[in-house]
Image (cartoon, grey):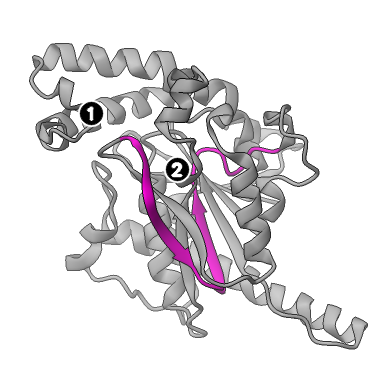
Amino acid sequence: MDESNNSLSPFVKFDAQTWSTFKHSSDKMTIKEEELKKYVAFNDKISIEEVNRIYMPLSSLLRMYYLSRHDRLAIIQKFLGKSMEEVPFIISISGPVSVGKTTTARLLNKLIKSWPCHPKVAMITTDGFLYPNSVLNKKMIMSRKGFPVSYDVKKLISFLLDVKEGKPNLKVPVYSHLTYDVVPDQYTIVDKPNVLIIEGVNVLQNGADYPDFKNRAFISDFIDYSIYVDAEEDNLLKWYIDRFLKLREKTFNDPSSYFHKYATIPEEYAISMAKLIWEAVNHVNLIENIQPCRDRANLILKKGSNHTIEEVYLRK
């Protein structure tokens, strides 16, 4: 993010210590040290100090945006002379594979539910809108899973339209990281939330990233506030390999795991396989599709080598 030194940059850069001073004195920590681990995604790391330093100020900022939207709605209603149904405030969490998007989403989910107004919060991932493996294989794009072409964009846009229209009991397909596939006939129900958190590598992508999808609206058009979790690729690769090795020791041993075949191979071969997958798939997707969307975000959280957020970039 060297471009932040340029006067033409759309972002203002803060180090973690400076960012921590923006926490409002009225905000109270709602996450206890002993329960923190249940919000941390597999192989990610975070401390209660970082929650206090980074996520408490971010929660305050999001609450201000949420409340200001209420003010705008009141103005529209006054102008039109009639009431309008409130639509969900949608927050997106994007970033590369293995960066820790899920941890950010879970923590924000917890903190937002604890706002004084106690909004109803729902959280989903765009993984559920991936085409099933059977379809990816039929289309011969299994090797491009996670790329724009691998998502059922029509279904995702239809869901977002329904959310914004306030439709109840919407079904979001469930994705299993064990079977590496969409689970048949299993859904997460999204029932008219006040706040929807949507996490995925593709939530900042727009029509230019999906030239074959002829639609006037796209994912980013429905987002009220967007967050991108960032890290240097050397760190991402290291975290990906670490996660792969830990999964190999645990989840891969399950015969139903998509990666069960890697459970018994020697560690050095497992590391080589993880590097190969990263270079062939994740690196390409990062450079071609994910990273180019970074500067579309409203906020960028930049992690250092130990998973800790060291810099915050706030859109002016």
Secondary-structure class at tag 1: helix
**Amino acid beneath label 1:** Phe
Q: Position of residue 165 (x, y in %)?
A: 69, 68
Q: Which residue is mark 2?
A: 127
**Amino acid beneath label 2:** Asp
Camera sees residue 278:
yes
Q: Position of residue 179 (x, y in %)?
A: 27, 37
Distance from the alpha carbon under mark 1 to that under mark 2 = 19 Å
- 111 vs 198, nearest the viewer: 198
Secondary-structure class at tag 2: helix
**Mark 1: few, some, or many residues within 10 Å (few <14, many ≥20)?**
many
Compared to 263, does 246 lie above or below? below
User: Magenta span has 312?
Assistant: no
Nearest to the eye among marks 1 and 2: give it.
2
Label whose residue precedes the other's in the sequence (1 or 2)? 2
- 255 vs 238, nearest the viewer: 255
Location of the N terminus by quadrant is top right
Image quadrant where residue 64 sits: bottom right
Q: Which mark is residue 244?
A: 1
Residue located at (29% from left, 38% from top) = 306
Q: Is residue 108 left or right of residue 29?
A: right
Residue located at (53% from left, 30% from top) = 150
Residue located at (65% from left, 62% from top) = 162
Per the rendered image, the range of residues in magenta is 180-206
